[in-house]
Amino acid sequence: MTRERTITLYASDGVALEARYAPGTGHRAALITHPHPLHGGDMHHPVVAAIAAAYARKGYATLRFNFRGVGNSQGRHDNGHAEGLDVLAAAAFLRRHAIPPTAMAGYSFGAWILARLEPFPSGMHHVLLVSPPVALLPFPHNGRLPGLRAIVGDRDAIAPLQRVEKVMTRLGATEGPVIVEDADHLFTDRMAQLDASLDTAIA
């Protein structure tokens, strides 16, 4: 993975966000969001790092960041409302650097934020939801996310497979989730299998 550097993003309401950016080898970029801040989630979570590394292996530039109120990001947790501004700030950073995001990937809470994002950035090739927490948080009942894909563990009580499949269909997916066998929500002892699944899911 190309060496990441720490940068600062600025949301439209003036909140400064801590982020990590690595250039890619082409003109594609992936924006990556992290799990729930109130349960220890941040951009350094092992699953988030694995997602960033997988996109980097495919030549994407990668940008992951801490939502407001996490780590060195300013502001406070807003239950998924203002966090959408944080995602749009990350997308704006990539556009300013002439590599508009072509992929977005979110893990758990981060997947929920992407599924609810409005307005959704144009020009997106795909959206990847890893362990979307459909058993805990209300996902939209309709809509269409471009190139929607998902990865789930078959022992994940927070992202149960059948409910994930229904949500994916509602959001416009044309194929089912990639399944990581014997994996829970944290992919405990299944990180190598997650890596392989990421390589399968990312074009």
Image (cartoon, helix red, strand yellow):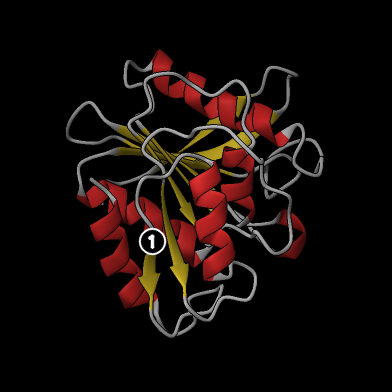
136 w.r.t. 141: above or below: below
Q: Where residue 129 appears, x then y in whole percent?
A: 48, 51
Residue found at x 73% / y 50%: 138
CA neighbours of label 1 inside 10 A, class few (<14), some (14 to 19), many (20+): some
Determine whether the residue tagged by mark 1 lies in a helix, strand or loop: helix
Q: Quadrant of the C terminus?
A: top left
- Disc tally is 1
* Front-most of residues 155 and 121: 155
Q: Where residue 26 appears, x then y in whole percent?
A: 18, 30
The residue labelled by disc 1 is 50
- Can residue 44 be seen here? The reply is no
* Front-most of residues 137 and 176: 176
Residue found at x 41% / y 33%: 146
Q: Where residue 38 appears, x then y in whole percent?
A: 77, 59
Q: Tell me the amino acid under the disc marked 1.
A: Ala
* Front-most of residues 98 and 137: 137
- Can residue 15 be seen here? The reply is yes
Q: Which residue is outermost to the left?
A: 25
Horizontally, residue 37 falls left or right of residue 127, namely: right
185 w.r.t. 10: above or below: below
Residue found at x 75% / y 31%: 82
Q: Where residue 37 appears, x then y in whole percent?
A: 72, 55
* Front-most of residues 92 and 129: 129
